[in-house]
Every structure is written in structure tokens, then in C-alpha cells.
Image (cartoon, rainbow, N blue to C red):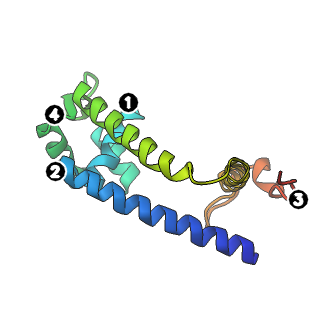
Amino acid sequence: MSTAGREFLTALDSLMESFQKDQRAVFRKLKLTPIQYFVLKWVAHNPAANMSHLAGFLGVRPQTVTPVVDALQRAGWLRRSPSAADRRESLLQVTAGGQRLLGRLHAAYLQRVGRALDAAPEPDLRTATMVLGIASAVLARTPPEGRSPPGPAASRSPARGRAVR
């Protein structure tokens, strides 16, 4: 990795740490834990969510996610209902209150980070956006260590030599 690449990763890591610290403060005010937020957001993006899928996604047993789901349900942010296909399975849905909470959190994030980004010159933001897009595309087609490539797309060489304007 180049020196510039290491410097970029260091700056990105610093940004993520600042964001996480800020996010934890917001969560404390809302009496929401980071895992509860993560679960709520995951369920909102997975319409067929159920306890088994959630546990599988997190890599834990279904019993492990039960207390998290129970707390979200008690807060009125998540609804659990029996599946019509298998009454032993619980389907998960974000409630209207949960959707409002996610909306508030997203708006707060955009406002806070937006103010920080306003300090950067427009051309630099465009360059950073392009760099993040390239890295994201390369990571999307590169399998994690220990896994086989998914197919021909993984054998393509990473994007290199793009002009930065």
C-alpha cells in the first residue's frame, strides 16, 4: 500500500471513530444501544426479516437476539408476529415509531456530518467521493480472505490509473 493510501485510511479511521463517538452520545439520549440500532436498521432493510435470519446474519443463535428484539418491541420500535407459514417462527417489522426514530437518527447524521463536510473544498469532496467509489467497487468484487472468488468479476484487475480532477 502506498503512503498516500495509508494516510487516507488513517484519516478515514479517524473520521469513523469520531462518528461512532458522536453516534453513541445520540444513542444514550434515546436510550438505544448500538446493537439495537443495528438490528432496527437491518430489519428496516429486510422486509422478510425473522428471528432466524437475524440470528444468522449476526452469526449467533436465535436465543441470543431475543433480548434485543424484546427491548425494541417494549420501546415500540419493532413488532414481532408469528409467521403464517410456521407459527414457531417470528416475523419482524419496524413500527411507525421505529421508522420515525430511524428517520430522526439519519437526519441528525446528515446534519452533523454535512456541517463537517461543508468545511472541505468542493473539488476535494469530489475526489474523495471518487476514491471511496473505487475502493467500494474493488471490495465488492474481491472475496474475503479464505473464500473463493465468486466468478469472472473477481478476476478483473482493480481500477487503477484513473485521472483525479
Provide residue 117's location: percent of width, then percent of height.
55, 51
First along the sequence among labels 3 and 1: 1
Provide residue 104's location: percent of width, then percent of height.
32, 36
Q: Which mark is residue 48?
A: 1
Residue density around tag 3, few if under 14, some if 14–19, many if 20 or more, within 10 Å? few
Quadrant containing the N terminus in the rendered view: bottom right
Asked whether residue 61 is in view, the answer is: no
Residue density around tag 4, few if under 14, some if 14–19, many if 20 or more, within 10 Å? some
Residue contact between numbered discs 4 and 2, judged by CB atoms under 8 Å: no
Tell me which amino acid carries mark 3: Gly
For disc 4, the marked residue is: 76
Tell me which amino acid carries mark 1: Ala
Task: Give the distance between the C-alpha atoms of the residues marked 1 and 2, in whole angstroms.
Answer: 20 Å
First along the sequence among labels 2 and 3: 2
For disc 2, the marked residue is: 67
Near-viewer residue (96 or 94): 96
Q: Quadrant of residue 93?
A: top left
Secondary structure at numbered mark 3:
loop
Secondary structure at numbered mark 2:
helix
Q: Point out the frontmost of discs 4 and 1.
A: 4
